[in-house]
Image (tube, coloured by chain):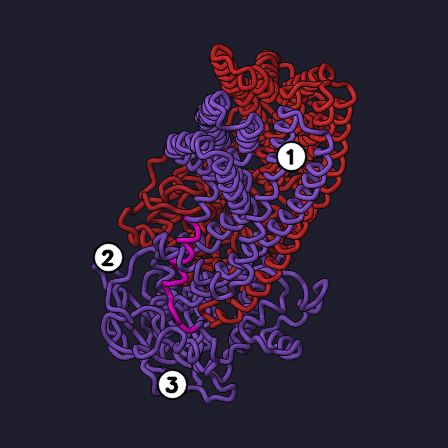
Amino acid sequence: MTTSAPAKILRTASGREASRWVFDHCRSAPVLPIATAVATVAGAVLQIVPVFLLGTVVDGVVQGRDASMLWTTGIATVVSALAGAVMTAISTYLVGRLGAELLARLREGAVRAVLGMPSARVEQAGRGDVLSRVGDDVAVISAGFRTAVPTMFSAVVLVVIATTGMFGLDWRLGLAGACALPAYWLALRWYLPRSQPLYRARSEAQADRAQALISGLDGIATVRAYRLENAFRDRVTAESWRVRNIGVDVFHFFGRFIGRENRAEFIGLGLIIVVGYLLVTGGQSSLGQVSVAALLFHKLFVPLGLIMAFFDEAQKSGAGVTRLVGVLTESGGDELVRSAVAVDADARPLPVSVRGLSFRYPDSEHDVLRDVDLEIPAGTSLALVGATGAGKTTLAALVAGTGTPLTGSVRIGSHDLADLDEAGARALVSILTQEAHVFAGPLAEDLRLAAPDATDDELMDALRTVGADTWVEALPSGLRTEVGEGGERLDATKVAQIALARLVLGRSPVVVLDESTAEAGSQGAAALERAALAACRGRTTLLVAHRLTQAVAADRIAVLNSGRVLEQGTHEELVALGGRYAALWAAWRFGTAHTDCVPR
Amino acid sequence: MTNTEVRTGREILRITLRRNRGAMAASTLLLGCYQAAETAVPVLLGVIVEYALRGGRLSSLGLALLALGLVMAAVSYSWRFGGRILQKATTTEAHRWRVEVADRGLQPVARETGLKSGEVLTIATEDADQTANVVEVVPLLVSSLVSVVITGVVLAVISVPLGVLVFAGTAAILTVLGVMSRRIGANTQAQQAMVARAGAKVSDLIAGLRPLHGFGGSHAAFQAYRRVSTEAKRQSIVVARVNGVYAGLGLALNSVLAAAVTLWAGLLTFRGEITIGQLVVVVGLAQFLIEPLKLFSEMPKYLMIARASAERMALVLAAPARMTPGTDGVVSESGLEVSGVTHGTLRDLTFSVRPGEFVAVAAYQPQAAADLAAVLSVEVPPASYQGVVRVGEQEVASLAIESVRTHLLVNPSHHEVFAGTLRDNVDPAGTSSLVDEAVAAAMLTDVVALHSDGLDHAVRDRGANLSGGQRQRLSLARALAADPEILVLHDPTTAVDAVTEQLIARNITTLRRGRTTIVITSSPALLDVADRVVVLDGGVVTSEGTHRDLLGRDAAYQLAVAR
């Protein structure tokens, strides 16, 4: 562990660091990068050879040589053209392949790093930042590696080779052509600072426009109920008009940029003509050589234009690489949670002991938990009861090893959670939170996230335990049915059952349940309570009771109020006590705290 | 401009073209100049080689530079201004159609489009853009034709057979590449789909990161991601191979044609039939012709895409409204009456609520509760159910939909949360004077207190950064803050814990005192605070009374609501 205070958002590597990463990758498997470079250079050389041969034709005519020279020139032209085409084909393939391998390694590394980060680090950096790295940045780099980067690479090589060729004709012709390059550079320097913010603003405006429309359409019932149609329509219109205006502005600058590019073309071509004129009239160069230089430069209009057009996108890919390399270096060699499953399948349940636990969120002056003491004997269950904001969820998270207490300790068996990192804690305790998520893909793949080696029969057993076997078998392709985003839609009860089935498959000795069964509606909730009981049978369980029937089923109950334990005991004991819990129970059951009119 | 009545895609295209005639004419002229100037560059190069370089006179060098400067300026300015006019017309046109499509989706009365909201979004964005692109077709077609014609004339002047070779060769190359690029298109799409799948996998894993961490599935998740990523890599390599073949073939065909043209023209030069300058012109034009010819050949595809997009827009724009709301009738008081309504699971349902009363409807079947909410919210048009609903003694069918919703608010049960602040969501119209009271009553205070910016705390679209219970309480706060004369709540506390539910039930009665309130619920806490409970079983009212009264005398009720 480093002692320096952690940065808030994830790291971004320096350009040098990112280059070193790419270089190291290339050095580890040098054959492909070297072959790529050789093929690209050879392709570029062979592409400009025919232009030179044209020069010999011109000089042949001027010097009045025999027309039979056309045959040798012709054969050389066709051969070099075809060889150039073959080399270009090979280079295009190799560049694409190199890019694909680099990209795969980069994105896999970044995803591994993100999955290996402690939850607290992810929450601290913000999910938006995390998702923008492994989502948006990877998408930007993928798009960049598909066209911009290979195009830039080939175009730059061609420009370098052709310029070298012009120097080969006569250094003064080469210099004339090279003089245009600063003009191109200045055009980019003028354009990018103006266009980049506009492009960014445009994609933001486009996102806002889509958001305004889609949230209006998705929430149309609410929009209509609250008569917000005009408000949403006005927002869509305003955002759409904003996109239009930015688009017009962007094009305005783009047109002027192309004008600057044309100017650079004129400078290069004009200089070559002037220098060529001086050389030809001075007898220092042949007409053929000067024609070749002019035609070569005219041939460079396209690759130079491509460099200009793709520069920005290639630069963005570069920025994406620095952000991803930053993520890679952030987590170092951390173990992935559960990469080495340390849990013995037949491990005996362990007791949980909470001593003097206090907790406070950063930037808050107010203690969420105050001096909490709890004991959960091995294999028994404890239910937490209390109003919103009483600290139930915070206590559950701390017992699961997420977050650091202000004072006090949580022990599971002989382990103090303070001595374990999140991966270590997860081997002892699993937590089921209110966030329900079904992972996209076949249902079996979702369940195997909890137990990668489980057989189909074991998966079905787990589903049977939580009462989900019947509906799973009734799915179009059973366990192989696609679920989650874009797949079969599952209601809240089924989603919760899948989460419980993962818990069954995970087999950790201690489980913490903080799921909200209530969203499933009252009938579904009863079924889920039974499922949760079955899933946790024989394991040490801490559960946050949203419905009091959950509390009744637990071995013991603790009532939390403003971060303190108010009452503790079995359901019968607490009802007999006639305190807070007894009142809550009566109210929950019959809707009234006055027990006088309640039937016995 | 809004509410243009169109029926077909053809009509949409006609309107688009008609209202952009001026821009099309101006840009056709300018882009024609641009193409002519572009074609002039290789021609000028030949002239310069012949007269300035070979001739060697200083005055002709000056003239050459002047001519080159003029041509390049013409290229630059005609493209810039022609493009600007065209781009402005196209984006403005896309904006107009986008707004029209959005307008149809966001009207008080639903339309029979049969489209999902994602599809409407695609129509409002991509299809609107592609339809507007039809404005570009004529200018691009005409201007590229200018270039092709000039090239043809120049080549014909130099040598007719050579011109024929250049044209035939270029057309053949375009045909071969066209066939190839269709194959590449399919491959690239497959690759993009793969990359998108890998991307979607990551978003999915991050969306489920907390549960994933909870059960310790990170390692297995990474293995799953690696499989998808490897598959995407393999597909990218396939695409690279196809791209390589395509690039190589294109280059080979182009260079062979260039070699043939060079040699033939070279032969003519040796024979003295053409000058060296003409040789340079022919070689230059042969390299240049492919660009305008490609543009020219792509126009039919452009037109087809625009046509298909316009047809999809017509699906939304021409869809009929689901109902015609009435216009007359003034609501004078705030009672609600349901009389003989038969719809879905409701069978001749009759009950009424007096002004200012707090009534709970306990529906034993959840579907009946949903059907009742759908009827009251006018989501189901009055014409498609039997019976009558009256708001303040006026039949809903005779009222304008706006006036129904002014008096009667049925809070939708899926708790929509919009991107914005907590305050924007509690008071979306910005007119409520009850925001603080509503927030307190819905027990949202702790969510507000959690953030230093309080009610101005940002919430993400669909309340992605809120829990289910928080979303539900936010939705309830919104309904209470709207303070309508008649408020209908449907299962307002299902995602809230038992203790909080108690408090909310009491708060609702306090805040709604004197206003008409109907709560469709099976929660004892809410049933207990109501003035009267209406029991709905099998689509009809089977029992009525206070909660305690019903608990005492009705065994079926006891079984159904007590937990």
In the figure, the shade used to draw chain A is: purple
- Residue A87 falls within the magenta-colored stretch: no
**Is B534 left or right of B511, judged from the image as shown?**
right
Which badge, 3 or 2, is on the more N-terminal residue?
3
**Is residue B405 placed above or below A333 in the rendered structure?**
above
The kind of residue tagged 3 is: Pro
Residue on which disc 2 sits: A363
- The quarter of the image holding the N terminus of chain B is top right
Residue extent of the magenta highlight: A319-335
Chain coloured red in the rendered structure: B
Which residue: 67% across, 31% down? B309
Res B483 → quadrant: top left
Residue on which disc 1 sits: B382
- In which chain is the residue bearing label 3? A
- Tag nearer the camera, 3 or 1: 3
Name the dominant secondary structure of the magenta segment: helix
Residue in the foreground of this view, choosing between B9 and B505 = B9
**Is residue A247 placed above or below B278 in the rendered structure?**
below
Q: Please indicate, yes or no, whether residue B382 appears anywhere in the rendered image.
A: yes
Residue on which disc 3 sits: A351
Disc 3 to disc 2, how far (Cα)?
Answer: 33 Å
Residue in the foreground of this view, choosing between B404 and A300 = A300
**Is A116 left or right of B121, judged from the image as shown?**
left
- Residue A333 falls within the magenta-colored stretch: yes
Which residue: 34% across, 54% down? A14
Neighbourhood count class around disc 2 (C-alpha, 10 Å): few under 14, some 14–19, many 20 upward: few
